[in-house]
Image (cartoon, rainbow, N blue to C red):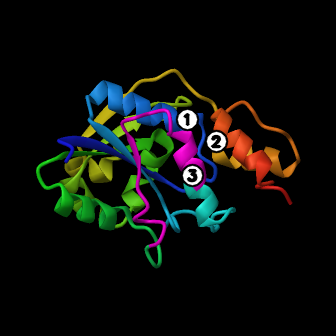
Amino acid sequence: MPASFGILGGTFDPPHLGHVAAAEAAWRQLGLEQVWVIPAGLAPLREASPVIPVEHRLALCKLAFAALPWAVVDTRELYRPGRSWSVDTARELAAEFPQARRVWILGADQLARLPQWREVEALGRLVEFAVLARDGLSVEVPESIKHCVRLTVLRAPEVKVSSTDLRAALRRGELIRNGLPSEVGRYIDEHHLYRL
């Protein structure tokens, strides 16, 4: 049972080096025992459904984090019916690990959207947050939720990559190597994922 762990959620469609950098920064800078990578079944604030099926996103997550012995890929949200609400996952993890330090890891782009998350006050009682600074985006907690969010700012070498851009390049038939862990790129090529 970990005494401390990070929680890195997302659609991971596909997982990229920015995700890995966020996990590594949190693990190293916060002294966490583990980082749990939790791919969402259906992310609440994402307009479209994931592009590739669950089994491929799960395989890609396992490959992306395979070299990190402290990373745990958890499937609880992939098979949960309906939308994958972070507060539901945080409640489950708090019940399973009531004494553990639980840190929700997010990017600066998600920090700005945090007031839109379901039951953010309840979430703030269940976890603390760590945000990875990137792209010059603000790492200030939005004023409306400052009272309920404990936040640590993580620093790491910037990785300029996004899943949206990677999917667009793959749809155009480009063989992507920059931005993806090598095994993830190989799996995408072998299974012809993201092609039109």
Q: Under tag 2, what secondary structure?
A: loop
The answer to whether residue 68 is visible is yes
Left or right, residue 49 beside residue 83 = right
Q: Which residue is mark 2?
A: 162
For residue 18, the mark is: 1
Q: CA distance from mark 1 to mark 2?
A: 8 Å
The amino acid sitting under disc 3 is Phe
In which quadrant is the C terminus drawn? bottom right
Residue drawn at x 27%, y 29% as measured from the top left: 30
Left or right, residue 124 beside residue 104 = left
Viewer-side residue, 3 vs 144: 3
Q: Residue furthest bottom?
A: 81
Q: Are marks 1 and 2 in contact (CB under 8 Å)?
A: yes
Q: Are marks 3 and 2 in contact (CB under 8 Å)?
A: no
Which mark sits nearer the N-terminus, 1 or 3?
3
The amino acid sitting under disc 1 is Gly
The amino acid sitting under disc 2 is Ser
Q: Which residue is mark 3?
A: 12
Q: Position of residue 55 (x, y in %)?
A: 60, 63
Front: mark 3 or 2: 3
Q: Are marks 1 and 3 in contact (CB under 8 Å)?
A: no
Viewer-side residue, 69 vs 144: 69
